[in-house]
């Protein structure tokens, strides 16, 4: 496990996994993803660990996909498509792992909670947000669809109408907006975030672990049975969209810090 990108700590039956790439606001590069999978596997197999906390370093949870890695093979259509296919599949693996680990997972949310970062937070069992957290389904702004199970998860959690609004418009949401949508369990001040997350983790760690595991298994069966298929569909759709002129315009405008002009092609 790469300690430079993911830090792991286990104490008092609680494992804390910290994404540690502050310069990118903890964007999901392949290296960070691999280190995160290793950390999650470690927490899953450690019989002393009863609860997992997922957080980001540097005052941010995650900015989502790693744009630099996405463009490392150039802007040619086939190269972009192949790279995006790979990266969407990578983040999908984390989504499945977060659901398939039958231990409660708490997302500690502050600062940027964007794109795949937001969707991986939605995959967790509990979400506690600082009042400075900013959430966005940013994909439409570069001509893509949500990954990491975003549309599927939002449909399950808030229904079709609000999901459509959130993913098609790509508006930024505050923590209080997320609370009104029942997408976070609690909003606290930034100063209270650490203590609030630890209090919930401690409470969960003192509950019967096998019962909690059975509950998560049943929730997966009833609420998330279609997640696998949704993730496969995301890979197919993103691979197709990566070849469009609109995606190239969106990503170029993002890099040039200007407003994109889409042609619907």
Image (cartoon, rainbow, N blue to C red):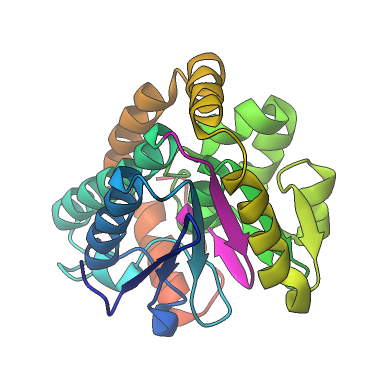
In the rendered image, residue 31, in percent from the top left (x then y), is placed at 22, 66
Q: State how many labels appear.
A: 0
Decide whether residue 103 is among the magenta residues. yes
From this view, report whether residue 150 is shown above or below residue 250. Answer: above
Quarter of image, res 74:
bottom left
Q: Nearer the viewer, residue 248 or 116?
A: 116
Residue 85 in the figure: left or right of residue 204: left
The residue furthest top is 222
From this view, report whether residue 193 is shown above or below residue 159. Answer: below
Residue depicted at x 56% and y 74%: 60
From this view, report whether residue 50 is shown above or below residue 63. Answer: above
Residue 70 in the figure: left or right of residue 183: left
Residue depicted at x 73% and y 29%: 161
In the rendered image, residue 179, in percent from the top left (x then y), is placed at 80, 49
Quarter of image, res 130:
bottom right
Magenta segment boundaries in residue numbering: 102-116
Residue 91 in the figure: left or right of residue 205: left
In the rendered image, residue 153, in percent from the top left (x then y), is placed at 55, 34
Q: Is residue 62 visible?
A: no
From this view, report whether residue 4 is shown above or below residue 184. Answer: below
Residue depicted at x 48% and y 44%: 146
Q: Nearer the viewer, residue 157 or 39?
A: 39
Report the quarter where the C terminus lies.
top left
Residue 3 in the figure: left or right of residue 11: left
Q: Is residue 106 visible?
A: yes
Report the quarter where the N terminus lies.
bottom left
Q: Nearer the viewer, residue 242 or 112?
A: 112
In the rendered image, residue 89, in percent from the top left (x then y), is placed at 26, 43
């Amino acid at each position: 496990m790469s300690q430079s990108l993911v830090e792991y700590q286990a104490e008092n039956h609680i494992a804390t996994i910290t994404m540690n790439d502050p310069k990118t606001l903890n964007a999901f590069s392949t290296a960070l993803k691999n280190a995160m999978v290793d950390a999650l596997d470690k927490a899953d197999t450690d019989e002393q660990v009863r609860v997992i906390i997922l957080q980001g370093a540097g005052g941010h949870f995650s900015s989502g996909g790693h744009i630099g890695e996405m463009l490392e093979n150039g802007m040619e259509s086939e190269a972009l498509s192949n790279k995006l296919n790979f990266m969407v599949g990578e983040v999908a693996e984390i989504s499945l792992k977060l659901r398939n680990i039958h231990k409660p997972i708490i997302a500690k949310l502050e600062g940027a909670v964007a794109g795949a970062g937001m969707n991986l937070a939605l995959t967790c069992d509990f979400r506690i947000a600082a009042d400075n957290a900013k959430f966005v389904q940013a994909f439409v702004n570069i001509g893509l669809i949500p990954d990491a199970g975003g549309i599927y998860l939002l449909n399950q959690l808030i229904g079709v109408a609000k999901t459509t609004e959130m993913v098609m418009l790509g508006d930024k949401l505050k923590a209080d907006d997320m609370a009104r949508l029942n997408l976070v369990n609690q909003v606290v001040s930034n100063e209270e975030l650490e203590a609030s997350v630890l209090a919930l983790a401690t409470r969960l760690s003192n509950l019967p672990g096998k019962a909690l595991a059975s509950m998560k298994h049943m929730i997966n069966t009833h609420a998330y049975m279609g997640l696998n298929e949704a993730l496969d569909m995301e890979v197919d759709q993103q691979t197709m969209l990566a070849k469009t002129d609109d995606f190239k315009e969106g990503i170029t405008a993002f890099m040039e810090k200007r407003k994109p002009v889409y042609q619907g092609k």
